Image: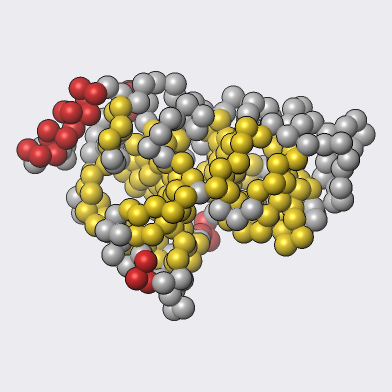
Amino acid sequence: MSIRPVKRIIESVPTLEGAGVKLRRAFGFGETAETDPFLLFDDFRNERPADYIAGFPWHPHRGIETITYVLAGTVLHGDSLGNSGQLGAGDIQWMTAGRGILHQEMPQGDPTGRMHGFQLWANLPSSLKMTTPRYQDVGGKDMPEIVDDDGTRVRVVCGSFWGKKGPVDGIAADPTYLDVSVPAGRRKTLAVDARRNAFAYVFEGSGSFRDASPPLGVLTDQPGPVENVVREQAGDRSLVLFDAGDEVTVQAGDRGIRFLLVSGTPIEEPVAWYGPIVMNTEAELRQAYAELRAGTFIKK
């Protein structure tokens, strides 16, 4: 077994999206090789309704899948296929845009005005770029949550982990999407398929991710310091990019740590990307926008 080294830690940056929503972007609209098959990750967390209430009005998508995970508040959504609904705290929506969809997402705060959620974009391979659009809306109650003996909690959104399978399936990137909480002072080792690219996004507390295998004889799931091991510190709103390996080890700080651990199989295809549309060639991208202008973007 080999612990994944940390390539680097990136602080998410303030960004304006939609009709003026203030959020933090961990990655997106740049080089995609390190995060392939994932293209973009946003953390929309606010306590001021004025910073998010304008939302994300009608806009197109093609060639990708969007994953919305809500922790606080609600998100009202609707689309050009006639679907509509509401995501509440703990819910997730996995939308396969495929050959094209128009939709809107309008965040609403909880009774205190707090709104918190994440959106992840996953690429589609060329063979599925023009697939039929679909939704998977999953309530938080349907997500398995595993509690380990040391108090570590893992919600399985997608993929299989510790014998439990998440409710979202049939996703091209074959991802694993976990919501992990490790109690203060605990050290935890989590398996990650060595064939996948992986990242962690810290959104509560802080901790350190080991950058080397532990010395022989060290029990990696026990609390307490380990000497002569290189660590990488990660705090709130930090993205941790991992190199190759089949395990991730984290040492929780004195307030514990909560993070998303996401991995997926790289597609390794050319990416032609502009705004919410992602194709394989510039010609395909131009065609998509020409269809959008001509009103032929939505395929029956």
User: Is residue 248 at all visible to an observer of this figure?
Assistant: yes
Expressed as whole percent of the image width and height from the top left, the position of residue 142 reads 52, 56
Q: Nearer the viewer, residue 152 or 235?
A: 235
Q: Is residue 230 above or below residue 141?
A: above
* 257 with respect to 121 (left or right): right
Which residue lies most toward the right here? Answer: 217
Expressed as whole percent of the image width and height from the top left, the position of residue 86 reads 35, 63
Residue drawn at x 10%, y 39% as measured from the top left:
293
Which residue lies most toward the left here? Answer: 294
Which residue lies most toward the bottom here? Answer: 111
User: Is residue 300 at all visible to an observer of this figure?
Assistant: no
* 234 with respect to 54 (left or right): right
Q: Quadrant of the N terminus?
A: top right
* 254 with respect to 72 (left or right): right
Residue drawn at x 18%, y 32% as measured from the top left:
288
Expressed as whole percent of the image width and height from the top left, the position of residue 167 reads 50, 48
Q: Nearer the viewer, residue 238 or 122?
A: 238
Q: Quadrant of the C terminus?
A: top left
Number of numbered markers:
0
Q: Nearer the viewer, residue 93 or 22?
A: 22
Expressed as whole percent of the image width and height from the top left, the position of residue 25 reads 45, 48
Q: Is residue 224 above or below residue 53?
A: above
* 296 with respect to 194 (left or right): left
Residue drawn at x 71%, y 51% as measured from the top left:
207
Residue 281 figure quarter? top left
Residue drawn at x 79%, y 31% as measured from the top left:
213
